[in-house]
């Protein structure tokens, strides 16, 4: 008897809930139209994924001699765009201007017996000029282009050769 009473109660409760949840009511009137908001100003076109791009001219006086020899020199270029997020997952490309072209670092010039390389860390890029085969090297004025790239832009452009300045310029819409 208890089983029958329980089954009947469940069926009756289910039937009442099904009937009471039907959509038979009329739709109410539309609400009043709100006040129109002000138009925003148009921004300039750009690329939000490029964190920073800067050109820096380094005169001979800004190079530090490494160890008192003329075979190793370094200079530090500051860039507030190099954050912990860039160090962890982004990237920094450095290019040196040679005539009218931009050459990616690291690079070497066997005719002049030198090698450029770089390292980056939060807030700066350290560029090193090292002699090949122990030759004396005297740094002149060098022009570098630092391009700081977010992880999202790096992932969005997986086929970009980040050592080819023309590709980097095109993909990131850089202005010379």
Image (cartoon, rainbow, N blue to C red):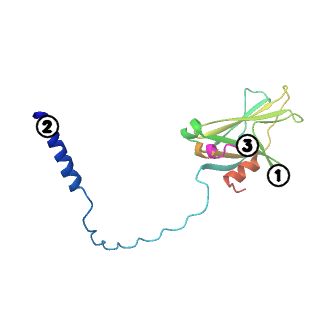
In space, the residues marked 3 and 2 are separated at their CA atoms by 76 Å
In space, the residues marked 2 and 1 are separated at their CA atoms by 94 Å
> What range of the chain is rendered magenta?
154-160
Q: Tell me where residue 9 sits by quadrant.
A: top left
Could you tell me how many numbered marks the image carries?
A: 3
Front one among 35 and 138? 35
Front one among 146 and 172? 172
Q: Which residue is mark 3?
A: 161
In the figure, 74 relative to 100: above or below? above
Q: In the rendering, which numbered label is found on residue 32? A: none
Front one among 29 and 160? 29
Q: Which mark is in front, 1 or 3?
A: 3
Q: Position of residue 79 (x, y in %)?
A: 61, 44
Q: How many other residues sit within 10 Å of disc 2, few (<14), some (14-19) or many (≥20)?
A: few
Q: Tell me where residue 24 sits by quadrant.
A: bottom left
Q: Which residue is mark 1?
A: 100
In the figure, 71 relative to 40: above or below? above
Q: Which mark is in front, 3 or 2?
A: 2
- Where the N terminus falls, by quadrant? top left
Q: Which residue is mark 2?
A: 4
Q: Position of residue 160 (x, y in %)?
A: 71, 45
In space, the residues marked 1 and 3 are separated at their CA atoms by 20 Å
Q: How many other residues sit within 10 Å of disc 3, few (<14), some (14-19) or many (≥20)?
A: few
Element at label 3: loop
Q: Position of residue 124 (x, y in %)?
A: 62, 40
Residue drawn at x 70%, y 57% as measured from the top left: 175
- Where the C terminus falls, by quadrant? bottom right
Q: Position of residue 106 (x, y in %)?
A: 75, 36
- Find out whether the residues at labels 2 and 1 contact each other: C-beta distance under 8 Å: no
């Amino acid at each position: 008897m208890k089983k029958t009473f329980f089954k009947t109660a469940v069926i009756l409760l289910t039937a009442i809930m099904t009937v009471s949840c039907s959509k038979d009511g009329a739709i109410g009137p539309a609400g009043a139209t709100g006040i129109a908001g002000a138009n925003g100003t148009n921004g300039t076109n750009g690329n939000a994924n490029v964190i920073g791009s800067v050109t820096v001219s380094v005169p001979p006086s800004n190079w530090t001699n490494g160890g008192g020899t003329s075979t190793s020199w370094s200079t530090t270029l500051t860039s507030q765009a190099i954050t912990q997020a860039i160090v962890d997952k982004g990237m920094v490309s450095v290019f040196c201007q040679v005539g009218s072209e931009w050459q990616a670092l690291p690079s070497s010039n066997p005719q002049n017996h030198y090698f450029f390389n770089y390292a980056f860390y939060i807030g700066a890029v350290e560029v090193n000029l090292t002699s090949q085969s122990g030759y004396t090297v005297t740094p002149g004025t060098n022009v570098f282009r630092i391009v700081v790239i977010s992880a999202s832009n790096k992932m969005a452009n997986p086929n970009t050769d980040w050592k080819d300045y023309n590709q980097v310029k095109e993909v990131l819409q850089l202005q010379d």
